[in-house]
Amino acid sequence: MSETPTRLSSGHALQLEFFETGSFRRRVDGWVHRKTVPYAIVAQPVAGSYAVRRNGRRETVTEGRVLYVPAHTPVEFGHHDGAGGLMEARWVHLHWSRWGMEDFLARYDASLLLEKSDGEEAGRLIGEALALNRLRDDDAGRLLGQHAVAARIAALLCRGRTAVVGPRREQLVPVLAHIRDRLAEPLSVDGLAERAGLSPARFHAVFKEEFGVTPMNYVRAARLEAAARLLVSTEMKLAVVAEATGFSDAFHLSHVFKEDYGVSPSEYRRRAAKLQP
């Protein structure tokens, strides 16, 4: 009796775009850190606590609990030392994309503070990620281990939650790939509609229904996200980042970036350089 193998379709392909982990143990009482970054933050205070403000809500994250902040979410971290006069914390930053474009975790709504059982599991996974840092950067065990830990953390964040996915989304996969591969080139609704095999008017309606934004606003957001990643992962000059992501010049990128992210590209780069939450 033969068996038909199960294959992962291209529409479900996931890619780990970004992953890093770290920790600190020092006196930081009263320090406030504000940031908006293009990756999800999963952090745990081991000693001391965080006072976190996100979306106008403040939450105290005590020792052992785990917090989650989605990518591109403005957040404020207040730091408070523990009984020993020090704060100790550890974290993972990660970004999973679907089709190389869509933020996979953004499809699932999750609260700031993980449930206690989920937090305990997340804490163990952060510990595993930190242990991998002892291996060389090019060690296969480290690379595969990071992917495995990142996948388990993503599964934990999505557990019990249903993604909102419309019926026509698979038809738009070629369009998302086209946008991803040609961010630096001129893009138009007519050209994207042709790629999807739809009239411009129908494409505009279907795209907005599936993603909640117009096609060109999606392109704008994709370009800004690509620019944000280059700002935090490279030392490229702003003019080079602008050229690589489809903006006419550094001034244009700065103007649009500040409109959406609330800070200039240089300030965004400076803040993101402080890895710890």
Image: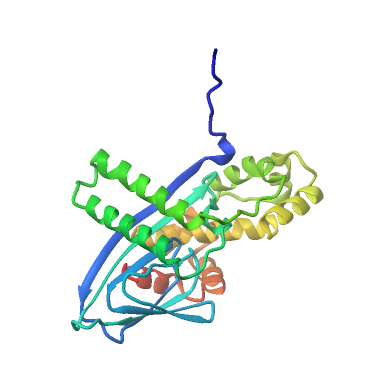
Is 10 positioned to the left or the right of 167 in the image? left
Residue 222: name its quadrant. bottom right
Q: Residue 48: image x %, image y %?
A: 28, 78
At a point 56% along the width and 46% down the height, the residue shown is 182
Q: Residue 134: image x %, image y %?
A: 18, 51
Q: Nearer the viewer, residue 185 or 8?
A: 8
Q: Is residue 77 above or below residue 144?
A: below
The residue most toward the front is: 117
Q: Nearer the viewer, residue 133 or 155?
A: 155
Q: Which quadrant holds the N terminus?
A: top right
Determine if residue 274 is in view.
Answer: no
Q: Residue 22: image x %, image y %?
A: 27, 62
At a point 39% along the width and 53% down the height, the residue shown is 18
Is 260 positioned to the left or the right of 153 in the image? right
Is 216 positioned to the left or the right of 125 in the image? right
Q: Is residue 141 above or below residue 256?
A: above
Q: Nearer the viewer, residue 92 or 266?
A: 92
Q: Nearer the viewer, residue 5 or 228?
A: 5
Q: Is residue 251 above or below residue 82?
A: above
The residue most toward the top is: 1
Is 230 positioned to the left or the right of 256 in the image? left
At a point 37% along the width and 57% down the height, the residue shown is 121
Determine if residue 5 is in view.
Answer: yes
Q: Residue 78: image x %, image y %?
A: 36, 82
Residue 237: name its quadrant. bottom left
